[in-house]
Image (cartoon, rainbow, N blue to C red):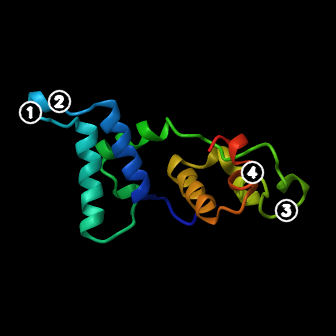
Amino acid sequence: MPADSRIHITDLEAAINHWRHRSPADAAGGAALCEELVALAEVYARLVYQRQESIAEDDMPPEAMFAWLDWYDTTMDTPCIAICSTSQGDATCKGCGRSFGEVQDWLELSPVQKRAVWRRITIEGTALRFTRYKERAGG
């Protein structure tokens, strides 16, 4: 299970882009940004200014967390590709890259914890999801 519940700056960028596409600014009407986009952008700017890569879930302002969760709901939930080697005794699944504990506890993990797992396995990139079966896994 992930050690802490932190939201990485790349997920904030993805959430900002989600809201930019969902509620584009109206250039003719003064280019006002939607509240969700402003909330996420403020957190993002603070991270950049402080040279930090992530923010603790508990430090996210409620408006920014709501906007982030709205983006999260558009992402794939599980990295599973139905090739589970943890069921055969492996400590780390060869199919998705999650640990045995992460596979077992997946439904109990918070969205922030799930994204931390996704980030780690994506960076590692060694699981079949990211190599042989990338097309099957949907990306």
Q: Residues within 10 Å of mark 3 (few under 14, many from 20)?
A: few
Of the 4 image quadrants, the one containing the N terminus is: bottom right
Identify which amino acid the numbered label 2 is placed on: Asp
Residue 80: x percent and y percent? 72, 45
The quarter of the displayed image where residue 65 is located: top left
**Mark 4 highlights which residue?**
104
The answer to whether the residues at label 2 and label 3 have Cβ atoms under 8 Å apart is no
Circle 4 SS class: helix
Q: Marks 4/2: CA distance?
A: 46 Å
Q: Nearer the viewer, mark 4 or mark 3?
A: 3
Residue 107 appearing in the image: yes
Q: Marks 1/2: CA distance?
A: 6 Å
The answer to whether the residues at label 1 and label 4 have Cβ atoms under 8 Å apart is no
Relative vertical location of residue 83 with respect to residue 102 in this rendering, above or below:
above
Circle 3 SS class: loop
Identify which amino acid the numbered label 3 is placed on: Asp
The quarter of the displayed image where residue 138 is located: top right
Q: Marks 1/4: CA distance?
A: 50 Å
**Viewer-closest of 126 and 35:** 126
Relative vertical location of residue 88 with respect to residue 62 in this rendering, above or below:
below
Q: Nearer the viewer, mark 1 or mark 3?
A: 1
User: Mark 1 vs mark 4: which is more N-terminal?
Assistant: 1
**102 on left or right of 20:** right
Residue 65 appearing in the image: no
**Mark 3 highlights which residue?**
90
Relative vertical location of residue 136 with respect to residue 126 in this rendering, above or below:
above
